[in-house]
């Protein structure tokens, strides 16, 4: 079991474009940022790769990532065992074991329990954050990542339980903080009111992110982006079933509690920040739930 991160040497070998001298520049910069936590060398490399080797963009991304994790700890920090089990009993989330021919990792999200009263949006966000942080920092970067959101079983009752503030927060975090190269987002088994969802989401995200979204009426069009050999058998694929992978993922989480506790300790101390923060609680600025919006 890894308590922290993948070895830096493996990442240098994985991508020769990562220059040790650029990593050194970032490490020296971090020493002059007393508000930021100590980072492993491999974490610095992962952030640099996600920003396509731009040192300035990497600095901003590192600050955004750890600032947001500190401001909304309830969405990131290791919860109780009971909360983890409840989240897994409602939602399915998995970074699949096989990459696309382009070398992209595939993350899929969907429902296990279709009852809206069991759906706690913040718990599902928390589960997503646990899994991607574990994958990124223990497995290292991929050439890109593709997201699949499965709406099977989703109803207006689920939509009414989505917190708009948290949704906007996570969209901003995806765009500015998470150290991945997002390539596309694919929505499958979509409901009849999908156009209303898209209309609500559009003003919450950049045009670049919105253009990454592909809505599929059948799985056949999904296969053009994510071939069958990369998908669970539930989607006509060659990988094990979602249920089997769900059990493996739950075990993986409990096997890595020490990793999550370590990552949770990487917090920002605003009292030590030099200058003004770019992100504060007031930055989030969207309150309420979808229940309060007219969707018909």
Image (cartoon, grey):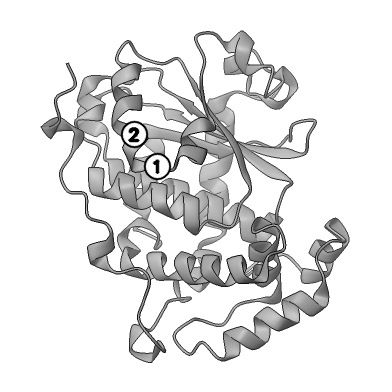
Q: Is residue 78 above or below residue 32?
A: above
Q: Please, what secondary structure does the residue beneath circle 2 have?
A: helix
Lateral position of residue 200 relative to residue 36, left or right? left
Q: Is residue 167 above or below residue 214?
A: below
Residue in the picture at 34% in, 34% down: 201
Q: Please, what secondary structure does the residue beneath circle 1 have?
A: loop
The residue lying furthest to the left in this view is: 292
Percent coordinates x, y for residue 217 in the rendering: 49, 9
Disc 1 designates what residue?
205
Lateral position of residue 162 relative to residue 17, left or right? left
Residue 118 visible in rendering: yes
Residue 201: mark in rendering: 2
Alpha carbon distance from label 1 to label 2: 7 Å
Residue in the picture at 23% in, 43% down: 163
The residue lying furthest to the front in this view is: 207
Lateral position of residue 181 relative to residue 10, left or right? left
- Contact, mark 1 vs mark 2 (Cβ under 8 Å): yes
Percent coordinates x, y for residue 170 in the rendering: 38, 50
């Amino acid at each position: 079991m890894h308590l922290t991160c993948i070895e830096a040497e493996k990442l240098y070998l994985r991508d020769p474009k990562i220059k040790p001298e650029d990593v050194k520049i970032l490490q020296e910069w971090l020493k002059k940022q007393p508000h930021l936590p100590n980072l492993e060398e491999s974490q610095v490399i992962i952030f640099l790769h996600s920003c396509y080797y731009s040192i300035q963009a990497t600095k901003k991304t590192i600050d955004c990532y750890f600032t947001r994790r500190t401001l909304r700890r309830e969405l990131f920090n290791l919860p109780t065992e009971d909360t983890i089990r409840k989240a897994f009993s409602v939602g399915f989330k998995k970074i699949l074991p096989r990459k696309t021919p382009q070398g992209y990792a595939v993350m899929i999200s969907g429902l296990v329990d279709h009852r809206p009263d069991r759906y706690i949006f913040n718990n599902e966000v928390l589960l997503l954050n646990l899994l991607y942080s574990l994958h990124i920092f223990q497995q290292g970067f991929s050439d890109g990542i593709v997201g699949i959101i499965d709406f099977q079983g989703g109803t207006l009752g689920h939509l009414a339980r989505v917190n708009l503030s948290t949704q906007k927060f996570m969209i901003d975090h995806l765009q500015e903080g998470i150290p991945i190269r997002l390539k596309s987002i694919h929505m499958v088994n979509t409901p009849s009111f999908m156009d209303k969802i898209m209309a609500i989401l559009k003003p919450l995200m950049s045009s670049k992110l919105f253009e990454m979204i592909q809505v599929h009426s059948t799985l056949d069009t999904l296969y053009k982006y994510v071939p069958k050999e990369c998908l669970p058998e539930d989607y006509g694929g060659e990988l094990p079933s979602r249920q089997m992978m769900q059990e493996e993922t739950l075990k993986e989480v409990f096997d890595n509690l020490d990793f999550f506790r370590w990552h949770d300790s990487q917090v920002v101390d605003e009292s030590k920040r030099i200058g003004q923060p770019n992100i504060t609680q007031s930055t989030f600025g969207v309150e309420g739930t979808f229940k309060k919006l007219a969707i018909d």
